[in-house]
Amino acid sequence: MESEAIKTVIDLIEKGTWELLFSDVLDFEISNTSDEKKRRSLQSISGMAVEIINLTNLIKDRASYFESFGLQAFDAMHLACAENNTDILLTVDDRFIKKANKINNLKVKIKNPLQWLEEVL
């Protein structure tokens, strides 16, 4: 079901219904993906991004704050990049979602793609 939800999200991005934002952090993770087929697929999706969020000191500081809630470094960076730049951060990492949703002053929604689609469609 999650894979179908992801395909639906990608389809909505391709149709221009939704916009995809990427970040330097995501680009770094993709470039370090060892599975070449998966890396190429992710890179093609990144080509649909309308904006790349660059790391700033403010984002790095906010990510450090998120790490204090138990988020892993990359998850904290993704969340900090998304926080003031987008409405929703989609991930299939349920532990990430659970930890992020415990942060009281979080300024962005974080959801599983399937859950998000059920809410908005």
Image (tube, rainbow, N blue to C red):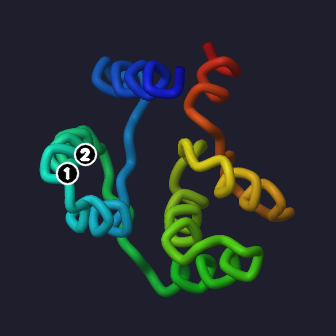
Q: Residue at x 75, y 53 (%)?
A: 98
Q: In x, y percent, where is residue 50?
A: 30, 44
Q: How many marks?
A: 2
Q: Nearer the viewer, residue 8 or 49?
A: 8
Give the quarter of the image for residue 95.
bottom right
- Give amino acid for label 1: Arg
Question: Which image quarter holds the C terminus?
Answer: top right
Q: Is residue 81 above or below residue 43?
A: below
Give the quarter of the image for residue 15.
top left
Q: In x, y percent, where is residue 110?
A: 65, 47
**Residue 20 in the figure: left or right of residue 41:** right
Q: Residue at x 66, y 79 (%)?
A: 67
Q: Secondary structure at mark 1?
A: helix
Q: Is residue 64 above or below residue 120?
A: below
| Image disc number at residue 39 | 1
Q: Residue at x 61, y 37 (%)?
A: 112
Q: In x, y percent, where is residue 75?
A: 55, 66
Q: In x, y percent, where is residue 68?
A: 74, 82
Distance from Cα at disc 1 to Cα at disc 2: 5 Å
Q: Are marks 1 and 2 in contact (CB under 8 Å)?
A: yes
Q: Residue at x 24, y 67 (%)?
A: 32
- Give amino acid for label 2: Leu
**Residue 96 in the figure: left or right of residue 46:** right
**Residue 93 in the figure: left or right of residue 22:** right
Extreme-front residue of the structure: 35
Q: Nearer the viewer, residue 64 or 74?
A: 74
| Image disc number at residue 98 | none
Q: Secondary structure at mark 2?
A: helix
Q: Which residue is label 2 attached to?
A: 42
